[in-house]
């Protein structure tokens, strides 16, 4: 035989470049907005490759297990599972946090809470800070890293969340600095003798109104914990309970720093005015210009 036959591509084989192209096509077809970027991330993740290698190694033939892994992750993403759960990771305040469906995926706007807590406390100050609804532990861990002398207490209703949060604290070497308490909002502090002792209570509580559940993206609605998102008919129910419960724990001049949803500031201000012992300090907007954080101070000396 004179002519050299082309090398037959055996069924089920693909180069890295082909795997990316096919992943992108499937993601695109499923309506994933950043299909190209996500296809690159998935292949990079499976092959544990530095970013530029997905380009330089595009002719590399994938092992059948690698190809099967890529396909498996693409299928999960096609079903709208967030990439953060697929990879088990989300960055927050410059730190990598392990996440799974037991915890809310930390959002960039929540970093504002950490910033405003840090602003009230100097690096040398020994203070007591409570993070309510800690979830992945992102807020408590980030504060513990930034304020090495602070004593932190983090609460959550879910023991599965607290397991994730504990792991994250260990991962970032602050495992010994945070006390984890399981319980409903500040009910978790009962018996801890913290009345009047807490300098800052910070929380990103659930704040979505029940009626808005159906409008959430499938990534959120189908995969993130409903209990970490939905507050009740209004959306501000947990802020109200936190405001009522926090007063006895805060030291005079202490602050309650809460994340809120767009359009909730007015309702929260009204709640604050009805509870004696507080002063509304300020409302902070996020980068999108939406109401995002309220800071309320405990009056008295
Ligand atoms: N504190 C966590 C976060 O901000 C979890 C919040 C929650 O579960 N509502 O991401």
Image: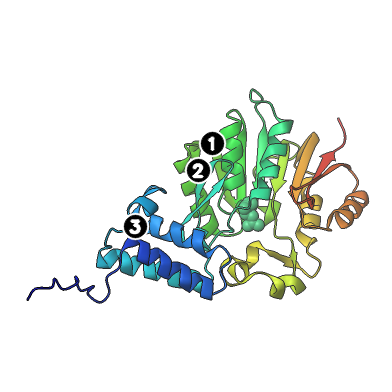
Q: Nearer the viewer, mark 3 or mark 2?
A: 3
Q: Earlier in the sequence, mark 3 or mark 1?
A: 3
Which one is in front, 217 or 297? 217
Residue count near mark 3 (Cα–Cα under 10 Å), binned few <14, some 14–19, many ≥20: some
Instruction: Name the secondary structure under disc 1.
Output: helix
Instruction: Name the secondary structure under disc 2.
Output: helix
Which one is in front, 255 or 185? 255
Provide the residue designation for mark 1: 177
Provide the residue designation for mark 3: 58
| Relative vertical location of residue 16 with respect to residue 137 in this rendering, above or below | below
The answer for how far apart the CA atoms under marks 3 and 2 are is 38 Å
The answer for how far apart the CA atoms under marks 2 and 1 are is 9 Å
Q: Position of residue 26 (x, y in %)?
A: 47, 73
Whether the residues at callouts 2 and 1 have beta carbons within 8 Å, the answer is yes
* Residue 35 visible, this angle: yes
Residue farthest along the front direction in this orientation: 2
Q: Nearer the viewer, mark 3 or mark 1?
A: 3
Residue count near mark 1 (Cα–Cα under 10 Å), binned few <14, some 14–19, many ≥20: some
Provide the residue designation for mark 2: 169
Instruction: Name the secondary structure under disc 3.
Output: loop
Give the side of residue 277 with respect to residue 72, left or right.
right
| Relative vertical location of residue 143 with respect to residue 79 in this rendering, above or below | above
Q: Nearer the viewer, mark 2 or mark 1?
A: 2
Quadrant, the C terminus: top right
For residue 223, which numbered disc appears in the image? none
Q: Earlier in the sequence, mark 2 or mark 1?
A: 2
């Amino acid at each position: 035989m004179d002519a050299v036959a082309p090398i037959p591509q055996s069924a089920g084989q693909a180069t890295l470049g082909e795997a990316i192209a096919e992943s992108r096509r499937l993601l695109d077809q499923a309506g994933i907005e950043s299909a190209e970027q996500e296809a690159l991330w998935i292949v990079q993740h499976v092959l544990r490759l530095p970013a530029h290698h997905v380009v330089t190694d595009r002719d590399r033939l994938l092992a059948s297990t690698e190809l099967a892994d890529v396909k498996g992750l693409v299928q999960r993403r096609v079903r709208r599972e967030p990439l953060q759960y697929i990879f088990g990771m989300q960055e927050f305040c410059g730190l990598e946090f392990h996440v799974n469906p037991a915890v809310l995926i930390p959002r960039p706007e929540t970093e504002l809470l950490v910033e405003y807590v840090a602003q009230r406390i100097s690096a040398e100050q020994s203070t007591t800070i409570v993070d309510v609804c800690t979830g992945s532990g992102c807020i408590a861990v980030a504060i513990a890293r930034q304020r090495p002398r602070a004593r932190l207490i983090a609460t959550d209703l879910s023991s599965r969340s607290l397991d994730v949060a504990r792991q994250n604290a260990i991962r970032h070497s602050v495992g010994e600095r945070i006390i984890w308490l399981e319980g409903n909002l500040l009910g978790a502090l009962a018996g801890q003798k913290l009345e009047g002792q807490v300098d800052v209570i910070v929380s990103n509580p659930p704040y979505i109104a029940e009626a808005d559940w159906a409008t959430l993206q499938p990534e959120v609605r189908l995969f993130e914990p409903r209990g970490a998102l939905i507050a009740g008919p209004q959306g501000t129910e947990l802020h109200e309970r936190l405001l009522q419960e926090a007063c006895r724990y805060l030291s005079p001049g202490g602050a309650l720093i809460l994340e809120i949803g767009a359009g909730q500031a007015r309702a929260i201000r009204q709640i604050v005015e009805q509870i004696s012992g507080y002063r509304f300090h300020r409302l902070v907007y996020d980068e999108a210009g939406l109401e995002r954080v309220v800071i309320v101070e405990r009056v008295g000396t």
